[in-house]
Image (tube, rainbow, N blue to C red):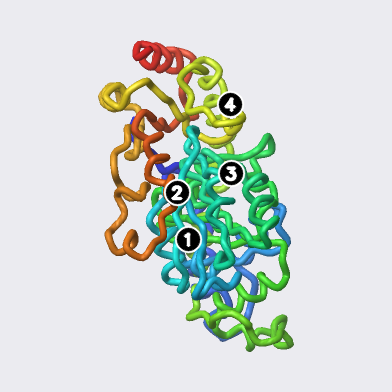
Amino acid sequence: MALRSFGAESTGANFIRMAELIVESKQLGRYYDHAGVTRLGMVVDLESQFQEWTGRRYAVAQASGTQGLVTALNAVGTAGREVVVPAYSFAACPIAIQVAGATPVLVGCRPDLSMDPEAVEHAITSRTAAVMIVHMRGRPSDAAVLTKVARSRGVPVIEDLSQFDGMGDERGNPDAGHSDIIVFSFQSRKMLSAGEGGMIATNDEELFRAVTQMTDTAWFMREPHKNWPEPKSLPGVGSRMNEATAALVLSQWADVMELAHRGREICAELADALSGFLCQGATDETRSVGTGLTLGLRVRTASQAQDLVATLRSRGYGVYPESAGNAEAHTFRGWPEFVRFRSRIEDATLASLGHLDTAVLLQVQPEWDLASRDALVRVVRSFA
């Protein structure tokens, strides 16, 4: 089975019912219906869902995940300074940093492909305005350790959960509350999918005000916000989510969370069965196992990794493109030249990307029965 978007697959009758409500109300945008009257709707419901799910006090819906990153960076105040970001991430991360007027400082990854805390600590200088944690393919970086490193130097932390891909704790919560601000994406390939859209969540009231003021250019006209002080950060051009986008995400919620829960269980079972093949961390060899729907496998050589990728794909397994070191948009090696030209690269960064050369990232499917799992284990073990 090829790589999947669980959210897109889960769009059905629930969305049709919600869409009918939107059509009947004539309220396509968040704030006004056809008579110009403000009422609460789908976007507000989705924000409430994210507040409960993440445990954050505030959530503000966005037109896209990338716009959410730009808004978060501007809310923190990064213009003219530097932001530390992993070189193993999607190009939207450094691009968002550049759009916010800052310079990306690219750091490397550990053997388990997570953001390297030692590299982050080395990269922080007096010019550092923020650290951006990126959780790639539902394989979480150690947000607790990374946030501790950043805060010891007085640096705020933005957490990009766009590719959370089902990752979560035993309750399915993807966020332990370590960072200052978190950003989600609902782009077409994401776990919750609306084609485009995003969400920002935080516990910080000042950051919430800044995000709201950049998201909604008419914030000063809203009754709850009229007494707010004017923003200290850059003014926003507006990135409000519409009601239909929110309805798409809400309609998928129950199905996707159930799939993610089952997928995490299967991923943990496979990790036990393939413990000798896992992309292990430098200090904690079991951290991040079973927390998402992506199984990170490692073989001895790059050619073996390429052969394993070809074998898995020939049998219908979904393998992510950066497996076996293929340069594509999720590694620095595949980013456009204009991104690399405007970035500062730490000395050890490029060498650390070599961890990808012998790694294979496999999307686990919640529907796999015992026979399917046993067949996968046999294929992988044949590369011992």
Instruction: Please tell me whether mark 2 or mark 3 is closer to you in this view.
Output: 2
Which structural element holds mark 4? loop
Q: Distance between the residues labelled 2 and 4?
A: 27 Å
In primary-sequence order, the first of circles 2 and 3 is 2
Identity, as a three-letter code, of the amino acid under mark 1: Gly
Could one spot residue 11 in this view of the protein? no
Identity, as a three-letter code, of the amino acid under mark 3: Ala
Instruction: Please tell me whether mark 1 or mark 3 is closer to you in this view.
Output: 1
Task: Kindly identify which residue carries mark 3.
Answer: 254
- Quadrant of the image for the C terminus? top left
> CB atoms at circles 2 and 3 under 8 Å apart?
no
In primary-sequence order, the first of circles 2 and 4 is 2
Q: How far apart are marks 1 and 4 (CA)?
A: 31 Å
Task: Kindly identify which residue carries mark 4.
Answer: 285
Q: Distance between the residues labelled 2 and 1?
A: 10 Å
Q: Residue 221 placed where, x, y %?
A: 63, 88
Total marks shown come to 4
- Quadrant of the image for the N terminus? top left
Side of 195 relative to 235 (left or right): left
Which structural element holds mark 3? helix
> CB atoms at circles 2 and 1 under 8 Å apart?
yes
In primary-sequence order, the first of circles 1 and 4 is 1
Task: Kindly identify which residue carries mark 2.
Answer: 190
Identity, as a three-letter code, of the amino acid under mark 4: Glu
Q: Residue 54 placed where, x, y %?
A: 67, 51
Task: Kindly identify which residue carries mark 1.
Answer: 65
Q: Nearer the viewer, residue 79 or 208?
A: 79
Q: Quadrant of residue 57?
A: bottom right
Q: Taking 100 as reference, is 297 above or below it?
A: above
What residue sits 53% from the left and 70% below the top?
71
In primary-sequence order, the first of circles 3 and 4 is 3
